[in-house]
Amino acid sequence: MVKRARDIVVVGASAGGVEVLQRVVRTLPAKFPGAIFITLHFPEHGTSVLPRILSRAGALSAIHAADGDSIVPGRIYIAPPDYHLLLTPRAIRLVRGPQENGNRPAIDPMFRSAAMAFGPRVIGVVLSGALDDGVAGLAAIKRRGGLAVAQDPEEALFPSMPRSAIEHVAIDRVAPVAQIGHAILELIDVPIPDLDPAVSHDDVAENEYAVADLGVIEQPEKHPGTVSPYSCPDCGGVLWEVRDGEFVRFRCRVGHGWTSDALLSQQSETLDDALWVAFRALEENAALSRQIAARHRARGANRLAQRLEEQALATHARADVIRHALMTHTRIEAAADQKAEDPRRAS
């Protein structure tokens, strides 16, 4: 029997990830025995020069993956902006499937597809980033017998992603950036059991969501999880609640995926936008009432003018309540962001 190797390495990073990726790639040998796949969050219409950066950083060649590419050992494949990078047993797929946690490319679809396609051959790596992207996909890798690596949160510029991975998944190695490459090389040699763990129904369904498979979308009985009272920030549809142990996340009918942290963050942004719209509408209403009141008073309609002026005062008072809420909310979020971004201040 031919000995199987752990030759598929999938890496997820977000904020602060470019520098970390450079340092990891720098430690990998030119004859690296596996293929490496990277998803770094990019703006939807952004331009990625990451292949050029990583090719210069180390001995391995890095390219943007193309749909249908064969998997070649010793090469780094990077998800291009606005496409999920998915793995199949035979080739790479690029799809414009539903966003996950507001991102495309997203880390979890790549991790999950790797787990489905290659089982225990996969090593998943979570690096610097905000919130908790990558946790669900890393859990899928572990369920299929793969191994997991996380950057040490204490040295990550944005520690939330690796910290969440460590809290919710049985990580095989937690390492500082300088040791992550060495950890990967060590784990490649960890023996693979003869029997692969079974694939769960929910993992299959979620993998199909990434390509907007109508066979899942049009059959509610195939949706993973249970119906929740929340709606999807992307499309307004009902969200299903999915649990990986204590890790709770959500997915809507058409496939948009959200972790609890990402959903809360997006709802906060939506609430913030709505409050600014309300504040603007109230201030405009108060200004218009004062303007009309002035015209009425100029022609002697004092009673009507007084009623409009009182209305303007009441409207302005309501606007001031919203303004205060906005300013307080902004200060609280700024303090929370500063704490999250500074590992020394994180609890």
Image (cartoon, rainbow, N blue to C red):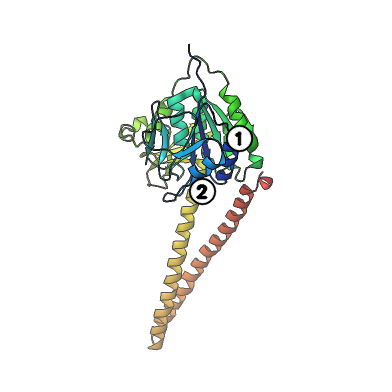
Instruction: Tell me the quadrant of the picture where the C terminus can be found.
Output: top right
Q: Amino acid at mark 1?
A: Thr
Q: Quadrant of residue 206?
A: top left
- Residue 341 visible here: yes
Check disc 2: other Cα within 10 Å, few if <14, some if 14-19, many if 20+: some
- Image coordinates of residue 269 in percent, x first then y, are 49, 53
Q: Amino acid at mark 2?
A: Ser
The residue under the point 47% across, 54% down is: 271
Q: Is residue 315 above or below residue 177?
A: below
Mark 1 vs mark 2, CA separation in Å: 35 Å
Q: Is residue 3 above or below residue 166?
A: above
Q: Residue furthest top?
A: 1
Query: Considering depth in this image, is 199 or 228 the residue closer to the camera?
Result: 199
Q: Is residue 147 left or right of residue 207?
A: right
Which residue lies under the disc numbered 2? 265
Q: Is residue 41 left or right of residue 26?
A: left
- Image coordinates of residue 75 in percent, x first then y, are 48, 33
The residue under the point 53% across, 60% down is: 326
Foreground mark, 1 or 2? 1
- Image coordinates of residue 130 in percent, x first then y, are 55, 45
Q: Determine the secondary structure under disc 1.
A: loop
Q: Which mark is residue 27?
A: 1
First in sequence, mark 1 or 2: give its number. 1
Check disc 1: other Cα within 10 Å, few if <14, some if 14-19, many if 20+: some
- Image coordinates of residue 309 in percent, x first then y, are 45, 78
